[in-house]
């Protein structure tokens, strides 16, 4: 992430940059916030914003554990790795909660988007409007 920010900070300003997932996913895996303060400060100086797609807990099984694009299979073997479906789902809930907590701790403006409806074009348009890109 630091190398990406180095390039953005030295760019001529004629490009817009969209960073997918950003640094909050690592925090969901257990990294500590202190390792990201500098990155967060640099992103704040660049006036970055964060949009996060969320799911209600009752949708996590169908959308994150047993994904349709993998024919409803446990595509990451999370049940096997965590010992039960409930433990795997608890891990997914905790990861989403950790991302949200990190985003709220960040200096960056953020927007939460409930992705239950799978209205991808609407979400993209709303986010583009919010960040000033317009679609």
Image (spheres, rainbow, N blue to C red):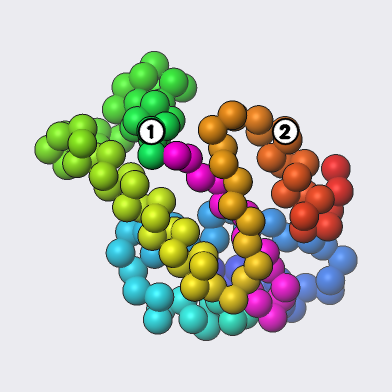
Residue closer to the observer: 55 or 14: 55
Residue pictured at 52% horizontal, 83% vertical? 38
Q: Considering only order in the chain, which callout, 1 or 2, is on the residue closer to the N terminus?
A: 1
Q: Residue furthest left?
A: 83
Does the segment drawn in magenta span residue 127? no
Residue at the outermost top position: 71
Dot 2: element: helix
Q: Position of residue 10 (x, y in %)?
A: 74, 78
Query: Label 1 crowding class (10 Å Cα cut-off): few <14, some 14-19, many 20+?
Result: few
Q: Is residue 119 above or below residue 5?
A: above
- Residues shaded magenta: 43-56
Residue 26, disc: none
Horizontal and vertical percent position of residue 75: 33, 29
Q: Is residue 22 left or right of residue 84?
A: right
Quadrant of residue 12 within the rendered picture? bottom right
Mark linked to residue 121 = 2
**Marks 2/1: CA–CA distance:** 23 Å
* Residue 107 spot, x, y in % from top left: 59, 76
Q: Is residue 26 visible?
A: no
Instruction: Determine the image quadrant of residue 116.
Output: top right
Mark 1, secondary structure of its residue: helix
Q: Which residue is mark 1?
A: 58
């Amino acid at each position: 992430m630091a190398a990406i920010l180095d390039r953005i900070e030295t760019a001529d300003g004629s490009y817009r940059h969209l960073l997918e997932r950003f640094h909050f996913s690592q925090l969901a895996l257990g990294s500590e916030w202190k390792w990201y303060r500098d990155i967060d400060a640099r992103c704040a100086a660049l006036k970055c914003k964060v949009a996060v797609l969320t799911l209600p807990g009752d949708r996590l099984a169908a959308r994150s554990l047993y994904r349709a694009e993998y024919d409803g299979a446990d595509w990451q073997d999370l049940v096997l790795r965590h010992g039960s479906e409930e433990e795997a789902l608890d891990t997914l809930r905790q990861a989403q909660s950790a991302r949200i907590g990190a985003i709220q701790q960040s200096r960056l403006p953020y927007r939460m988007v409930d992705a239950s409806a799978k209205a991808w074009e609407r979400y993209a348009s709303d986010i583009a409007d919010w960040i000033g890109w317009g679609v």
